[in-house]
Image (cartoon, rainbow, N blue to C red):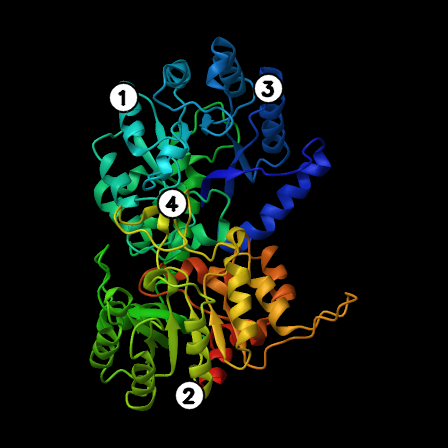
Amino acid sequence: MIDCHFHVWTQDVSTAAARADRAEQFREEASVLGIDRTTLIGELGDTVDACRENNRTIAAFVEEHPDLFYGWARAHPEWGDDAVAEFKRAVTEDGLVGLKHHFLGTEINITDTEFAPLAEAAVELDVPIIAHVMQNEEPYPTERPSEARSEDVASLASRYPDLKLISGHISAGGNWEHRIKRIADHENVYLDLSGSNCEVGQIEMAADVLGVDRLLFGTDTWLSVCAGKLDGADLPASDKAQIAYNFENLLHEGVENRLSLVEREERIDAARERFEAFDRPREETIVDVNAYVGRWPFHPFDASSEGLLEVMDRKGVDKAIVSSLGSVFYRDPQHGNRELVRDIDGHEDRLLPFTTINPTFPGWEDDLRHCVEEWGMHGVRLLPAYHDYEINAPEAKDLLRACADLEVPAMLVAALEDQRGRHPRVELRHFEGIGQSRMWRQDEGKIDDVIDLLLEVPETDVIVADTWTGGYRIIKETTTVNRRDVRLQNKVRTGQTFVVIDDLFCYWTQMQGRQIVDGIGVDHLVMGPQLPFMTFESTYNYTKHLPASEAEKDRVRSGNVIELLDL
């Protein structure tokens, strides 16, 4: 696979040895994911001279590691003729593939008049421009007026029909359905498939609406997630292999290390065989602790029991802990719990029900007891953002105590979808404001609130989803004794505590995976790919490539939750 979108993000790039450190780091991760090369994006710089040095640094990466790298040029539109001259120099002298534009550092939109000379230069050079593009809901656009949206992409593409324009990261946040349809009529626009949001259907819709030839594999540096997103797309293996190498079609003759036609075809054939292997179910025992049944009101993926089981069969998922989507939105969640019992009837051997309880709703205690004792539900899910209460509210603590009394675990869920693409009239508690996704917001104290809840009710077994970078703190501060302070920190939980590995911050499994193993530990990890919302392979890469033994990975895949539920 050829990645069209990768940030260098390297502190020291001043020497060949320093650059080799980044190259080897990339090689180690890419080799296990099927990524051949990536296209580097360097820093812009405050002056033309600084920008020239940064572009030359990217060219040095390419020259020193031609088997791994291509490179994008940078230039600030406000530099006028000097920007155009540097862009042309970087392409013709350094062999860089085209221009990367990001509004950060420039505050120039791609439709602004200052950008036009660079677009014209790209047409003259017959090279692509890749633009940072988002489609987030209000109030986000008012915070970043120069950030490109799909309307800006369409406008620039119309103005320059011979420009090869790449709309960056389909799912780095925002409404990907809108983005796909908005550029459909512009044949000179290509779509970069990168982005951390792995909702099902995005690549399939893009292929259907735009055609496979307009799709480019990209990662935006999220290697494991984005590789898995293409691996798991519901497309023929031959189409995925074409997407994996489409970027080669945009490279100009001055890119000396581009693949020959023979090399390209050989790699496409190898990629097709690799993708075909993903069509076979996995043999490992896998349990998804965060699955759902019902109807999602914002996108028509099949969340029926039959639809979920069909996905599980294709992917090789043995069991799933399921809750009702109706319970998320009904005023009284018990209606959804009742529907869940009906929906999974006959499938209880594979679909294990967790009741959804709103502890601020009257009669929840009786509902909980009925769900556990009469309907045989295995645990409880709390969704405070949807049911409008604080995660460490007294009612939430009462609910966890009731779970302990009934000897069932509780699961804490922050949100079910990336809030940057939310419905414009549905704004969840704690997710107000600029650019929030779907995790507990550590910078606003939400991880503190989760920890407070866990320590206040230490006897309850708990699974915490959506912890992002907070998973380390949760495990450290609730399950370990800190003897390194004059004040002994020895209040620890007696109940079991798990975090969902799929929701952790993990660009690269080989590096950050080691941090996860060392900082959280396999005994505190469970898998929750959130079927049928998400593309399974995206976050299964976290577990599949975790730097741990297969026996340890088996604990994450299923062993821990099987022991928790005594299955």
> Which mark sits nearer the N-terminus, 4 or 1?
1
Q: Amino acid at mark 3?
A: Arg
- The reply to whether residue 445 is visible in this rendering is yes
Q: Amino acid at mark 2?
A: Leu
Q: Dot 1, crowdedness within 10 Å: few (<14), some or many (≥20)?
A: some
Q: Which residue is mark 3?
A: 52
Secondary structure at badge 1 equals loop
Q: CA separation, marks 4 and 1? A: 27 Å
The residue that appears at 40% across and 30% down in the rendered structure is 131
Q: CA separation, marks 4 and 2? A: 40 Å
> Which mark sits nearer the N-terminus, 3 or 2?
3
Q: CA separation, marks 3 and 2? A: 66 Å
Q: Which residue is mark 2?
A: 406
- The reply to whether residue 285 is visible in this rendering is no
Q: Which residue is mark 4?
A: 173
Q: CA separation, marks 4 and 3? A: 31 Å
